[in-house]
Image: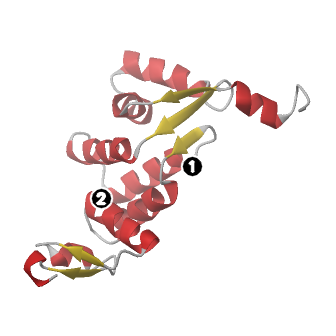
Amino acid sequence: MRAHGSGDARRESRRNVWVDANVVLRFLTGSPPEMAEQARLFFSRVGADLQVRVSPITIAEIVWTLESYYGFDRKRIGEVVSAFCRSPGVLVLEQDAILEALADYSAKNVDFADAYLAAQVIRYGAGVVATFDEKHFSRPKVQTARPDLV
């Protein structure tokens, strides 16, 4: 049996909540102010009584929105989203692949989705990526081939 005040007991008492990209975006951008304040209050509870779960598709939506709507540059997106992913109480599915993809996205001028796929290929050792856009995978150093040549 665990002691009442132990870290393990506290983790077990946290409520697991999946978070949508719009909540994270309000938190990261501060816009619009009234929603951003609600998001800030929500995230102030993360690690204490909430454990937030984030799917890879949610991270992709966050990256896309920060770039296309908010005009963040790739370096800033990589820094902000990586820091969010590493926050206490935030559990990002496939976090290692996400962080590797964010690093490649921000440093190697490759689309996030392609960088994520490349990270998965490297992680799971799948070998070849069938693609018509071979140049997109040259920076993350993944073997590619046109579909008709696989």
66 or 137, which is in the foreground?
137
Q: Which residue is mark 2?
A: 112
**Quick one: quadrant of the N terminus?**
top right
Q: Amino acid at mark 1?
A: Arg
Is 6 above or below relative to 130? above
Residue 35, above or below 31: above
Give left or right: position of 46 versus 7.
Answer: left
The correct choice, above or below, for 88 with respect to 45 in the image is below
Q: Position of residue 66 (x, y in %)?
A: 30, 43
Identify the residue shown where x is 39% and y is 62%.
101
* x, y percent for residue 124: 43, 70
Q: Which mark is residue 86?
A: 1
**Is 6 left, or right, of 126 in this rendering?**
right
Label 1 packing within 10 angstroms: few (<14), some (14-19), many (20+)? few
- Is 116 placed left or right of 97 in the picture? left
Q: In the image, what residue type sits under mark 2?
A: Phe
Residue 150 horizontal/vertical position (percent): 16, 81
Query: Spatial distance from mark 2 to mark 1, Cα to Cα?
Result: 18 Å
Q: Earlier in the sequence, mark 2 or mark 1?
A: 1
- Residue 135 placed where, x, y %? 18, 78
